[in-house]
Image (tube, rainbow, N blue to C red):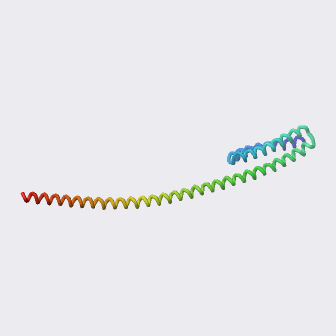
Amino acid sequence: MKEEVAQAIDAARTHFEAMRTTLSDKAAVVGAEVKDTIERHLSDIEEGLNKARADVERGTDEARLQAALGAMEARDRWRAIETELDTHLRKLKADGQETFDKIRLQAELDRASAEAAIATRTEEAQKWFAESVESGEKTLNELAAKIKTTVSASLEKLKSL
C-alpha cells in the first residue's frame, strides 16, 4: 500500500511539473502580476506534494490521508489557476481586438482626411493654373499690342523718310 501511495504522489508530481511547464509557457503572455500569482499557487502545490511524499516515506496512515488531500488540493488549485489564466487571456484578447479596431478606425479617418486634403489641393492647383493661363494670355495680348504699336510707329517713320 505504501508503494502505491508513493507512486500516486510521484505521478501527481510528474503531472504537476507538466502543468508548471504549460503554465510557464502561457504565463509569458499574461504579464508579471498573473505570473507571480500562478507561481505562488504552484509553489504551494509543490510544497504540498513534497510534504505528502515525505510523509509517505515515514509510512504513516496520516501520510495516506495527506497524500490524497494533497492531490485533491493540487487539482483544485490547478483549476483555479486555469480559470484565472483563461480570464486573463480572454481579457488580453479583447483588449487586443479593441486596440486593433481603434487603429483601423484611425487609419480610415486618416485616409478620408488625406483624400479631402488632396481634393482641396487639386482644386487650388486647377484654379492657380487657370489664373496663370489667363494672366499669361493677358500679358501676351498686351505685349502683342505694344509690338503692333511699335511696329506701326516704326513703319510710319519709315514712310515719312
Residue 39 in view in this figure: yes
For the C terminus, the image quarter is: bottom left
Q: Is residue 152 above or below residue 16?
A: below
Residue at x 85%, y 46% (from the top left corner): 70
Residue closest to the eye, 147 or 25: 147
Q: Where is residue 80 in the image (x, y as percent from the top left)?
A: 78, 51
Residue closest to the eye, 14 or 127: 127
Q: Locate residue 139 relative to residue 154 in the image: left or right.
A: right
> Residue extending furthest left?
161
Among the 4 quarters of the image, the one containing residue 28: top right
Residue 15 in view in this figure: no
Q: Where is residue 99 in the image (x, y as percent from the top left)?
A: 61, 54
Q: Where is residue 87 in the image (x, y as percent from the top left)?
A: 72, 54
Residue at x 29%, y 59% (from the top left corner): 136
Q: Position of residue 33 (x, y in %)?
A: 72, 46
Q: Locate residue 106 relative to residue 141 in the image: left or right.
A: right
Q: Locate residue 19 relative to residue 121 in the image: left or right.
A: right
Residue closest to the eye, 53 or 129: 129
For the N terminus, the image quarter is: top right
- Number of numbered callouts drawn: 0
Residue at x 9%, y 57% (from the top left corner): 158
Residue at x 81%, y 50% (from the top left corner): 76
Among the 4 quarters of the image, the one containing residue 119: bottom left
